[in-house]
Image (spheres, rainbow, N blue to C red):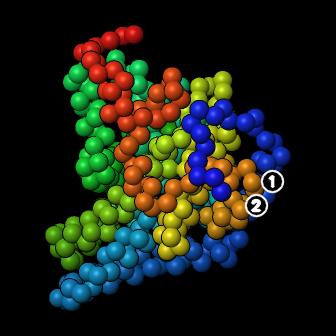
């Protein structure tokens, strides 16, 4: 397989035959889906039970379970993500039931997140469809827009993309605070708004009950110990699969969902155990090409279609390098560039410029 798509290559015409063939993989096996759901959710609940009971009785070695619990929290988020696309089960009711249960464990309101995520799939990497708060990690700013900012706004923007802020500060803020309110949600989204408040109420009863029985400090520390690392890793996965060297942004008239899957998503090649914990989300190009494919059929779909064999491939080492290198979209060169490249190209950036 080649390693990347050239950033200045015009995407080929949309392939109707490829799309039809790819969609044949959109048929979930209920036995596999049920086993994944029970083993993942049951495993996470078992880890929580062992952590609370063990620490409460002074058996602190159970804290070694924290990485496993965080991994299962990541997998729970991945499964509810597939439920949000209706790809884990054929039944909409089953998808909603499993999705809502997973979201309770990941502090995320299912219906609200699902609708915002559907908007992401509808126009990701479309330069004319940006600005949603829910796309904070997949959105971009153009070089021209960056030059037009005042000096203070440019500094604030650079700080907002700093690794410490992006990966260490924002993930817990998003999962523990932002998801507690129906942000960017019009009043016509009644089910989604109700879902936010219902999720909050369930979280209050569940974790409030744990705090009442085991104590506020223990509950807070164990919850942070599980969710915080999971949130950081989940955000990093999402970020590197949408911002990397070779990613391509288009305007409305050239944009198509299938071509954006080929040029706007990376193939994150992870070790087998990380693929399991992430629910095979590394095959993000396949997921965007056909969101209805269940996680356990993504690899087979990739292998069966040569059209996917030229997408950008990232290993773990490349992924770490890519995380914060490509921040601005250069419309002239048709590529993502880092802040340093923008400043080298225009060293005397004016305080404000409208050109």
Tell me the distance, in whole angstroms, between the alpha carbons under discs 1 and 2.
Answer: 9 Å
- Tally the marks: 2
Q: Which of 200 and 301 is in front in this view?
A: 301
User: Which residue is disc 2 drawn over?
Assistant: 304
Q: Earlier in the sequence, mark 1 or mark 2?
A: 1
For the residues labelled 1 and 2, say whether their Cβ atoms are less than 8 Å apart. yes
Question: Circle 1 — which element?
Answer: helix
In the figure, 6 relative to 23: above or below? Answer: above
Q: Return the residue nearer the eye: 270 or 195.
A: 270
Residue 312 at x, y = what percent? Answer: 57, 49
Residue 292 % position (x, y): 67, 55
**Residue identifier under label 1:** 21
Query: Mark 1 Cα within 10 Å, few/some/many (few <14, many 20+)?
Result: few
Residue drawn at point x = 63 percent, y = 34 percent: 9
| Mark 2 neighbour class, 10 Å CA radius: few under 14, some 14 to 19, many 20 or more | few
Q: Where is residue 286 in the image (x, y as percent from the top left)?
A: 64, 54
> Closer to the camera, 271 or 125?
271
Residue 5 is drawn in which quadrant?
top right
| Residue 325 appearing in the image | yes
| Placement of 93 over or under 136, stated as above or below | below
For the N terminus, give its image quadrant: bottom right
Say the numbered circle drawn on residue 87.
none
């Amino acid at each position: 397989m080649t390693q990347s798509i050239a950033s200045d290559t015009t995407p080929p015409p949309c392939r109707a035959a490829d799309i039809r063939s790819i969609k044949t993989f959109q048929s979930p096996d209920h036995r596999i889906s049920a086993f994944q759901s029970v083993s993942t959710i049951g495993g996470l609940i078992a880890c929580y039970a062992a952590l609370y009971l063990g620490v409460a009785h002074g058996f602190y070695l159970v804290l070694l379970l924290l990485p496993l619990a965080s991994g299962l929290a990541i997998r729970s988020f991945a499964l509810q993500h597939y439920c949000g696309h209706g790809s884990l089960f054929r039944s909409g009711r089953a998808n909603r039931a499993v999705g809502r249960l997973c979201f309770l464990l990941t502090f995320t309101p299912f219906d609200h997140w699902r609708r915002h995520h559907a908007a992401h799939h509808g126009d990701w990497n479309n330069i004319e469809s940006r600005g949603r708060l829910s796309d904070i990690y997949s959105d971009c700013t153009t070089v021209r827009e960056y030059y037009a900012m005042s000096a203070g706004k440019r500094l604030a923007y650079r700080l907002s993309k700093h690794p410490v802020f992006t990966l260490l500060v924002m993930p817990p803020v998003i999962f523990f605070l932002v998801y507690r309110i129906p942000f960017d949600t019009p009043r016509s989204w009644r089910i989604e708004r109700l879902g936010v408040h219902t999720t909050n109420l369930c979280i209050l009863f569940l974790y409030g009950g744990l705090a009442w029985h085991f104590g506020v400090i223990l509950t807070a520390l164990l919850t942070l110990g599980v969710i915080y690392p999971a949130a950081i890793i989940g955000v990093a996965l999402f970020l590197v699969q949408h911002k990397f060297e070779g990613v391509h942004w288009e305007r409305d008239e050239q944009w198509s969902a299938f071509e954006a899957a080929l040029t706007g998503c990376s193939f994150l090649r992870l070790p087998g155990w990380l693929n399991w914990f992430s629910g095979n989300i590394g095959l993000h190009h396949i997921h965007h090409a056909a969101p209805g494919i269940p996680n356990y059929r993504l690899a087979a779909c990739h292998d069966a279609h040569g059209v996917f064999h030229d997408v950008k491939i990232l290993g773990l080492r490349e992924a770490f390098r890519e995380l914060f290198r490509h921040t601005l979209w250069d419309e002239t060169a048709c590529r993502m560039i880092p802040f340093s490249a923008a400043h080298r190209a225009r060293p005397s950036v004016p305080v404000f410029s409208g050109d």
